[in-house]
Image (cartoon, rainbow, N blue to C red):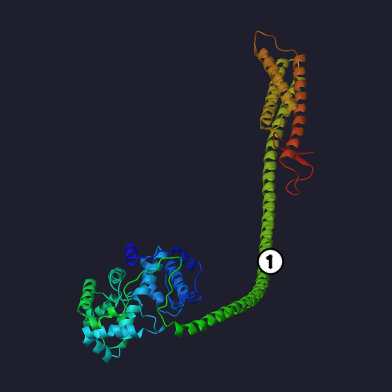
Amino acid sequence: SLIWKSILALPENRGAFVALINKGVHPAFASLEQSMPLTNRSLLSTVKRLISCLAYWSPIFIRVKYLPIFLLPFARVIKHDQFSCFESVATIIVNWCQGWFDFVPYPPLGVLESVKRLLTLHDHELVSHYSDCNISSDLYIWSLLETGFSEVLGGAEWQQLWDHVLSNHPAFLLFLVVAFNSVCHTTLMCLHQVDDFEHFFHTEVVINMNQLISKAYQLWSDTPADSHPRSELKPFKPLVKGNMYQMFTDYPKHLLDQQLDKLSNLYEEQEALGSQRLEVDRQKLELDLGRKQSEEARLREARLRELEEMYKHTLRKEESHLDNQRRSVTAARRGLREKEVVVRSQTLDKTLQDKATKYAQLEQLMGRIEQKKGSAELQSGVSWGSSHQSTDSASLRIQHASVVHHLSKLRRLYHQSHMAHPQLKLCIIKFEDLLARIETTLELEQSSRHPRPNDQQVLSLEEETQALEDEAQQLLKRLSVTSETHRYPPISTGSKRGQSSCYCCGNSKKS
């Protein structure tokens, strides 16, 4: 692009360009994307701004339908400098597009006739083939010029071609058109259908660029002076440097002014219609919005009703489920209570049975003790004088056995109890003291070195033993009632009224 700026001698009228670019997009090209679909939105925006600047510079370009296609490859090459791109395209239009706008919007007949004469001069056979196939010069000449060769050449080939175009006389571009047809002579002679020619001249062609450019220079040299288009075109002249760009008048102004006035009126009418259309669209949008809101409200109400019904159904279902669970839990609790009552009853029955057995054993033991005591007293009364010593010894042994029995039972009860009982502990101490004195007395009696105990001492031990036994029985009875209250609270079944169990021996006793 720097080389092109130097070759074209751009004026760099930045103030004039800013004035044009500030006008924005021209109404004629507001919808350019519809006729020129580009995926690159940035490139499309650049083309719209540049072509709008050309339209504001000269109204003729509003009527030039091929201008966006012609401008596109230049915008691709000089994509980062819109200012230089505009001045380059404007310079090219002024110099290399001479006579192109004589019959806008139709192809320039003068330019087409000039190129056709050159092609007939250098390749008459190909021109005859075009004529036989009803192919007009609009296709094999104008399609190349109006696109600037951008449709038949790739990017690098196109740029190489324009390097030579801008380095030569403006008429050199016409020789490149003739050279292209001549280089592709063999291929074109094989075509006969219009559609095939259309496809060829609007599709990228793989061509030897060096051969094409050499052919153009050869044709330039071989063309006679009387047929050379150099005399018909003005030599290169750069744009004038200043605060404004020079006026572009290379078109039939007297024929175009009337059309431009009509176009201006049409644009104004189009703008008015656009405003009216916008108003109608706005009203339609408001109407549609109102209808949509009403429909949404109706659908919302219907959906809310559906949700309400669904929630009610779900609530009823959950309540039914909870009722079933509640009944199941109640039944489980009832069954658990019944099982608990049965287990308690069975446990109580077994406990009472065990206690009754132990109590019976204890009663038997106590009976044997009482029986032995009675026998001892009877023997004491019958043979007091003869066997007084043996009677005292038997009585002490009986007392010793009774005290050992009661002391063992009290100790077991004390160790099994979960609560402290001062009276029980005191009773155990008394029994231990009594047991120690009885054992001492028995030891003294059995020793030959000590005299036997007197009757008063034996009677005292008997009375003390009997008192402690009574006290132990009362204490055991109270503890049995207290322990039954703590261990087994009253229940409706499983025990008889007025009956309790002894805590120490497990026997059932009536209150």
Q: Write the residue at 78% across / 21% down.
A: 463
Quick one: quadrant of the N terminus? Answer: bottom left
One can see residue 190 in this view:
no
One can see residue 286 in this view:
yes
Q: Nearer the viewer, residue 434 or 112?
A: 112
Q: Is residue 36 left or right of residue 336?
A: left
Q: Is residue 308 left or right of residue 12?
A: right
- Number of on-image labels: 1
- In the rendering, at what x and y percent does residue 73 appear? 36, 70
In terms of image quadrants, where is residue 193?
bottom left
| Crowd tier of the residue under label 1, counting other residues whose Cα lies within 10 Å: few below 14, some 14–19, many 20 or above | few
- In the rendering, at what x and y percent does residue 154 appear? 30, 71
Q: Secondary structure at mark 1?
A: helix
Above or below, 458 against 198 in this view is above
In terms of image quadrants, where is residue 97?
bottom left
In terms of image quadrants, where is residue 362?
top right
Q: Nearer the viewer, residue 442 or 269?
A: 269
Above or below, 189 against 490 in this view is below
Q: Amino acid at mark 1?
A: Arg
Q: Write the residue at 74% across / 43% down.
A: 489
Q: Nearer the viewer, residue 322 or 346?
A: 322
Q: Nearer the viewer, residue 76 or 238?
A: 238
Q: Which residue is tagged 1?
A: 316
- In the rendering, at what x and y percent does residue 485 appear? 75, 39
- In the rendering, at what x and y percent does residue 295 appear? 65, 75
Above or below, 1 against 448 in this view is below
Quick one: quadrant of the C terminus? Answer: top right
